Image (spheres, rainbow, N blue to C red):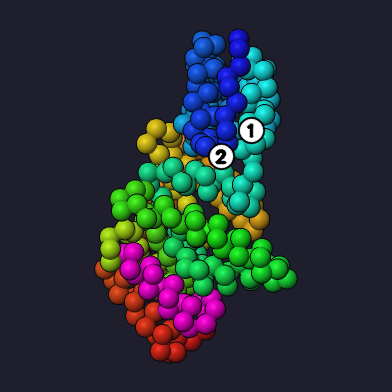
Amino acid sequence: MPGPKDLDPSSSPRAMIGAELRHARETAGLSQAELGEPLFVSGSFIGQLESGTRRLHLEYAVQLDEILGTNGFFERNCKALARSKYPDHFAEAAEAEAVASAIREYATLLIPGLLQTRGYAEEIFRAYKPTAPGSEIEALVRARLERAQLIDDPTTPLLWMVLDEAVLRRKVGGGPVMSGALQHIASLARRHRIIVQVLPFSSGAHASMTGPLKLMEFEDAPPLSFAEAPDMGKLLDDPATVARHNLTFSLLQAAALSPEDSLALIESVAQDYEHGDQRP
């Protein structure tokens, strides 16, 4: 069959690749499950590629061209779309995040990237890369702030953040940096743009002692969870795993302070930093 036209990656990233994949699959008379079988992936994974929720990796692109007879279309455009301003281990999660209808996140030690201020992000990246030139740090900060622009929409996505109390107490940068960072979170909460809860030290052991947690939901694709470690990250779509992570987040919500009490604590700690009363 004639191959689809090459897309301009700068005009529309994965959504157009997904539309072409759906067209090619339907033209070949295959269901999502049937196309996934020779790739050893689920039908839902194919659906996520078609909806633009997941990034198409080169190994799958090559096989898809062979199965669907698309004359190297997916391989060529996959290589072009692989370029990202985000670190390799996080790029796919950041792209999925941009099209999510709901994001729920538990943060253990630092403010989630979507909620960070410039000053806070600069301190974080400088700690990660102490010998990097200023231009590299600036590029990382710019990418993080651009990613946070999805909050500019007044309603979508739904953002529900549970912050461990350690996030508030760990002094990243000086008092003014922390005060500004926490005041930014409080402002988003007061404008009803995010729901935020604090998991206090007094809650003791909880359901996610081993690390952070991010869950994403989509209008036209199955939900995902994201597991992250230093310089490592993986999107997970196994229904049982995602269901378990959903339960974990629900338990964290139950153990955390109410949104009202959480906001009061965040603003109180911000005031302490502003007046130099917060101990490191």
* Residue where numbered disc 2 is placed: 10
Q: Residue at x 34, y 52 (%)?
A: 153
Q: Residue at x 51, y 71 (%)?
A: 120
Residue 27, given in percent of the width and then of the height, sits at 51, 12
Q: Residue at x 61, y 47 (%)?
A: 84
Q: Quadrant of the N terminus?
A: top right
Residue 211, given in percent of the width and then of the height, sits at 54, 59
Q: Nearer the viewer, residue 30 or 229?
A: 30
Q: Nearer the viewer, residue 36 or 53?
A: 53
- Which secondary structure lies at badge 2? loop
Q: Amino acid at mark 2?
A: Ser
Question: Who comes first in sequence, dot 2 or dot 1?
Answer: 2
Q: Residue at x 28, y 71 (%)?
A: 261
Query: For the residues marked 2 and 1, what is the alpha-carbon distance in whole angstroms?
Result: 13 Å
Main SS of residues in magenta:
helix
Q: Is residue 94 above or below residue 52?
A: below
- Closest to the camera, between mark 2 and mark 1, is 2
- Which secondary structure lies at badge 1? helix
Residue 171, given in percent of the width and then of the height, sits at 52, 78
Neighbor class of circle 1 (other Cα within 10 Å; few <14, some 14-19, many 20+) is many
Residue 68, given in percent of the width and then of the height, sits at 61, 15
Q: Is residue 53 above or below residue 4?
A: below
Judge whether residue 139 is colored magenta.
Answer: no
Q: Nearer the viewer, residue 166 or 208?
A: 166
* Residue where numbered disc 1 is placed: 78
Q: Is residue 67 visible?
A: no
Q: Which residues are magenta?
A: 170-189
Judge whether residue 174 is colored magenta.
Answer: yes
